[in-house]
Amino acid sequence: MVLCKTGMIWNMCGTSAFFNELKIDPTESKILLTDPPLNPSKNREKMVETMFEKYNFAGVFIQIQAVLTLYAQGLLTGLVIDSGDGVTHVVPVVDGYSFPHLTKRMNVAGRHITSYLVDLLVRRGYAMNRSTDFETVRDVKEKLCYISYDYKREYQLGLETTILVKNYTLPDGRVIKVGTERFQAPEALFTPELIDVEGDGMADMVFRCIQEMDIDNRMMLYQHIVLSGGSTMYPGLPSRLEKEILDRYLEVVLKGNKDGLKGTNINLLIWCLFLATLPDRPSQNIKRYKGKVKQPICNYETAVADRGSTAKKAYGVPWGCSPCRNYEGCSRVLD
């Protein structure tokens, strides 16, 4: 019986485990329910309704899984990467509050990696079936698969040598050899295009999520990235993720600032330096009036006196001051 699919509850019938497995009296107990990110409100309402009306719990509390993950690490602020069987989420949390509008979702997780590993073994020449051999291949994945630090170099090494090949004994006694498939299958977490899934990979989601956060909290999120879920337990995943994020961050810092001074920005900088060296002429500079009385921030009368005659002839209206070009009269005032 499938109770959850892609992180959402699809079947509420399985909740009878409260009586069969937990062996508790709901009327004398309170229950804490974990909620996946981006869970629709109607699902929460249905869960609470079931807990109260069907099982008569004394109290119900629902909390986002990512927040509880940070609590378990003794943190209130951080970025949680939660990858389980059906879906992967990247959730930013600040002071115990998650940000649904910044949460990223990728429909690639453990089940998809297992299916991809089945396809890779079939290409290698082994007779595998997605339904009957699924659990067997899942065990192969959990025991042999890992995340490569450099995918291209690892793949080239696998083609030229047999150092990466491992043996696995199937339940029927057959022995299969698993080579580059060991890191090709979980590579889908970083490159979902391998299994025909559009969207960002894990590293891209993490980087985009942090960069979209306000600048005051970005460094805290970079310093506290927490992995959660079975699909984050591959050997080599933390080091690969750190490498990918560092590459993207340095690319923005180095190339971003360098490109920001090209083209029109250089011209703007030169123009600003030129204006800064102009003499203190009333017709060119904006002067701040002293005193408590509210007065125009622009020397409108001086500007009109200098250019008024020409402006009236050309446009029929007073010429506004050079900075604001307000032809109807300057309305900017000091407090």
Image (cartoon, grey):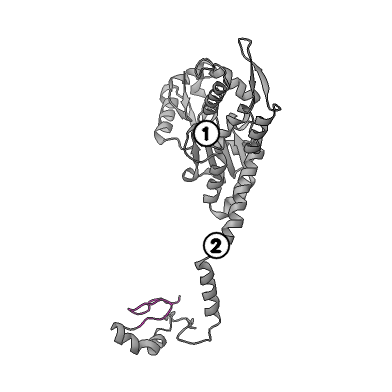
Determine crowd level at label 2: few under 14, some 14-19, many 20+ residues with C-alpha closer than 10 A.
few
User: Residue 294 falls in which quadrant of the image?
Assistant: bottom left
State the mark number for residue 260: 2
Magenta region includes residue 320: yes
Q: At x 65% / y 34%, what residue is drawn?
A: 156
Q: Position of residue 277 (x, y in %)?
A: 56, 82
Disc 2/disc 1 C-alpha distance (Å): 34 Å
Chief SS of the magenta region: loop
254 vs 102: above or below: below
Q: Which residue, as the protein is rendered here, is positioned at the far right?
A: 163
Q: Position of residue 212 (x, y in %)?
A: 52, 50
Q: What is the secondary structure assignment of the residue under circle 1?
A: helix
| 141 and 47: which is toward the camera | 141
Q: Quadrant of the C terminus?
A: bottom left
Magenta region includes residue 278: no
| 30 and 172: which is toward the camera | 172
Q: From where the camera sits, is residue 63 visible?
A: no
Q: Which residue, as the protein is rendered here, is positioned at the far top?
A: 172
The type of residue carrying mark 2 is Gly
Q: Nearer the viewer, mark 2 or mark 1?
A: 1
State the mark number for residue 194: 1
Q: Position of residue 134 (x, y in %)?
A: 53, 19
Q: Position of residue 129 (x, y in %)?
A: 51, 17
Give the magenta-colored segment's residue range. 319-334
143 vs 308: above or below: above
78 vs 132: above or below: below
Give the mark nearer the N terminus: 2 vs 1: 1
